[in-house]
Amino acid sequence: MEQKINTYEAMFLVPSGQPASEAMCEPIKTILERYGAEILRLDHWDERRLAYKIRTHKHGNFILGYFRLDPSKIVEIEHDCGLSEDIIRVQILRRDKLSAEDIEYEFGLTASMPQRMDFEDDDTPPPPTEVVDTDETEEAEEEADSEEEESAEEDTAEDTAEEPSEETGDEPEENDQDEERPEGTI
């Protein structure tokens, strides 16, 4: 019975702070060699600030690797990477139609990618999103406040007026509860 061997691409996230890229790759090489993987390429790709903390890590180094392996051992490799304290995360993809020239070409592309700018890491503030003239906004607020006061004064004047209603011609109703009546009368 012949074993089927596939080509895989993997991105490993390891903690930052290790100076040499060879030292960062050692735990990954150990795991891959334990399961008999043929390592085609394994190199440091980039160090980045993470979008959120992962196991108390704010920064991480990404290791990009290509290897050939029996597909039944991928789950075991992912499991071992999850248990390792030297590897934060791993993503493994099957890349069957990838030749050695394609691997070298992809490594060349990733090495020449422009670096992403992080405003949080340096002192340069991000550009403002909207410019607001404070004089115009203060004038608009004062106009809105004066209009509200005028409409509130008109509302209270209408409520307190006791004039006959123009629509029905009836006299305004008097409040029976305010009048004092002698006891025994209704």
Image (cartoon, rainbow, N blue to C red):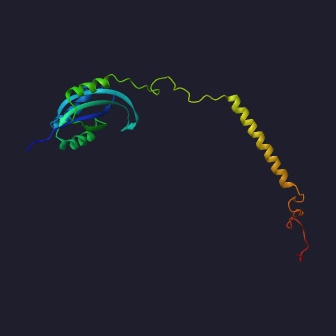
- Tell me: residue 59, above or below residue 167: above
Whether residue 17 is visible here, answered yes or no, is no
Front position in the image: 94 or 180:
94
**Which quadrant is home to the C terminus?**
bottom right
**Which quadrant is home to the N terminus?**
top left
Front position in the image: 78 or 148:
148
Front position in the image: 78 or 2:
2
How far from the left and from the top, in percent, is residue 128? 56, 27
Q: Look at 9% across and 42% down and name the residue there.
A: 2
Task: Judge from the rendering whether residue 39 lies leftward or rightward of residue 54; answer left or right.
Answer: left
- Tell me: residue 168, above or below residue 186: above
- Tell me: residue 46, above or below residue 150: above
In the displayed image of the protein, which residue is found farthest to the left? 1
How far from the left and from the top, in percent, is residue 160? 86, 54
Q: Look at 33% across and 27% down and name the residue there.
A: 46
How far from the left and from the top, in percent, is residue 107? 27, 25
Whether residue 97 is visible here, answered yes or no, is yes
- Tell me: residue 80, above or below residue 165: above
Q: Look at 22% across and 28% down and name the residue there.
A: 41
How far from the left and from the top, in percent, is residue 38? 16, 33
Quarter where residue 42 is shown: top left
